[in-house]
Amino acid sequence: MNKTKLLIDKDYTIAPLGKRLYSTFVEHLGRCIYEGIYEPGHPTADKDGFREDVRALVRELNFGALRYPGGNFVSGYNWLDGIGPKASRPTRLDYAWCSIEPNEIGIDEFCDYAKSVGSEVMYAVNMGTGTPQDAGYIVEYANFPSGTYYSDLRIKNGHKEPHGIKLWCVGNEMDGPWQICHLDAHDYGKKALETAKIMKWADPSIELCVCGSATSFLPTYPEWDRIVLEYVYDKVDYISLHRYYENRGNELDFLASYHEMNEFIKTVAATADYVKALKRSKKTMMLSFDEWNIWYQAKTELKKWEFAPHILEDNYSLLDALSFGGLLCTLINNSDRVHIGCLAQMVNVIAPIFTEKGGKAIRQTTFYPFAMAANNCLGTALRSIGKPPMLDSALYGQVSAIPHAAVWNEEKQDINIIFTNISEEQQHIELDLRSFGKVKMTEHQVLSGDLSASNTLEKPDRIKPTFMDCPGAETEKPEITLEPKSFNFFKFSV
Ligand code: AHR
């Protein structure tokens, strides 16, 4: 029997890791908001129209931040349309998704919602049709205490206390030719710099994230990142990365997507470090991977001018959840640079939660790996040392068959490890945890089975984790087995 030895030592740290790595994204797109989190008239709707059944699932995912309101949507959005009495808010054409936008939800309702699920808001300003001045006004509206036009307007609209939004995106995917009022790197760099100055004057305590490459396969990558950072390096705190993966027919390549995500992160970090050197700066730029997921983009079809259209409603298989599990490992293993990670998106639109109008809310397959990581893998990410079995992928060459990530929670005195076995074989692993002394396995959850199976409204629990029996023994070197093509979560108590 082949056994892999992995040493995980409490002194071999990557970085402290907090809730922000497990953030998400809520866009005015399809049924993410309307019929997703918000559906007045639904049997579980609260007095403001938010679905309690969805809210309960959102809470299970323990999100750090909710990125809002877009996405492509934000590049044509006038935030003033979404404040004040609902009856007088305009209905607009949303050019990004060819939809009808009634503006029933805006910044005030959304900030209240985020609070109710224990998350902070990451607010994106419009760098398409919007101006640097608009961006300053919205910071003033959200965060300035009182006594100015926009802060007093917020108070008039029922929010005496500022929303106190800390995280702000300076636009969305401005390198993408699909973006409303797309810019080239120099034009965006200049606009982002002037916008950042105004936003930080309005509230110096905020953290700003500038648009990096919308994906690693655009021809402008990574020159875009370099040029933009040369303009804004001193004024911003994060550069964004976005990347979606899909199964294009070669299963191993798809399961090895985590490898490409790792390369992408390393390249953007290296680009940022080049600019750091050029500027003789002492600051290291952090990364915000604020859109990532599995998305069957090739199958996406838009509808024309509908309200809450059924678009981007991917139904995830177990295979998708396994590839997704590898991506989670990559984010954790890069937590020294990636401080924010937003699973795009939260409900219905390429999401872990799916809803039926007037009916149920269910967990997709991807819900489970995310929930296991977001609720347990908090603390200090640890590097593992060993020689994992390798597989030969067509796209990326040799890749590990067992992408994994380990997090030490000192407060709770437990070690939390996620493993995806992307190989066809059982994998036997001896974990060397001796730096912790004797440990005891207290939890082992597994996702495995029919790789093509998914959860649907009719069969919502087809794929869900199995809780395995844990051996009672205390040991410094626990041995574990991973079933072929499975996602696993282990907890060891020290
Ligand atoms: O998440 C869906 C879309 O993907 C977002 O609106 C956009 O930012 C990205 O291209």
Image (spheres, rainbow, N blue to C red):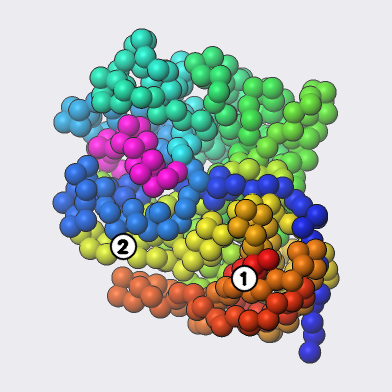
Residue identified by numbered label 2:
361
**Picture quarter with the C terminus:** bottom right
Mark positioned earlier in the residue sequence (1 or 2): 2
For image coordinates 48% across by 50% down, the residue present is 63
**From mark 1 to mark 2, how far is it between C-alphas?**
28 Å
Residue nearer the viewer, 33 or 8: 8
For image coordinates 44% across by 28% down, the residue present is 164
For image coordinates 73% across by 80% down, the residue present is 479
Over which residues does the magenta segment extend?
A: 98-119
Query: In this image, 282 relative to 36: left or right?
Result: right
The answer to whether residue 348 is above or below residue 153 is below
Residue identified by numbered label 1:
490
Give the percent coordinates (x, y) of residue 55: 33, 53
Is disc 1 placed on a helix, strand or loop?
A: strand
Magenta stretch encompasses residue 128: no
Is any part of residue 181 visible from this angle? no
Q: Residues within 10 Å of mark 1 (few under 14, many from 20)?
A: many
The amino acid type found where label 2 is placed reads Ala
Query: In this image, 218 relative to 47: left or right?
Result: right
Instruction: Judge depth for marks 1 and 2 and give the one in front.
Output: 1
The amino acid type found where label 1 is placed reads Phe
Which quarter of the figure has residue 9? Answer: bottom right
Q: Check mark 2 vs ligand 1: CB closer than 8 Å? yes or no.
A: no
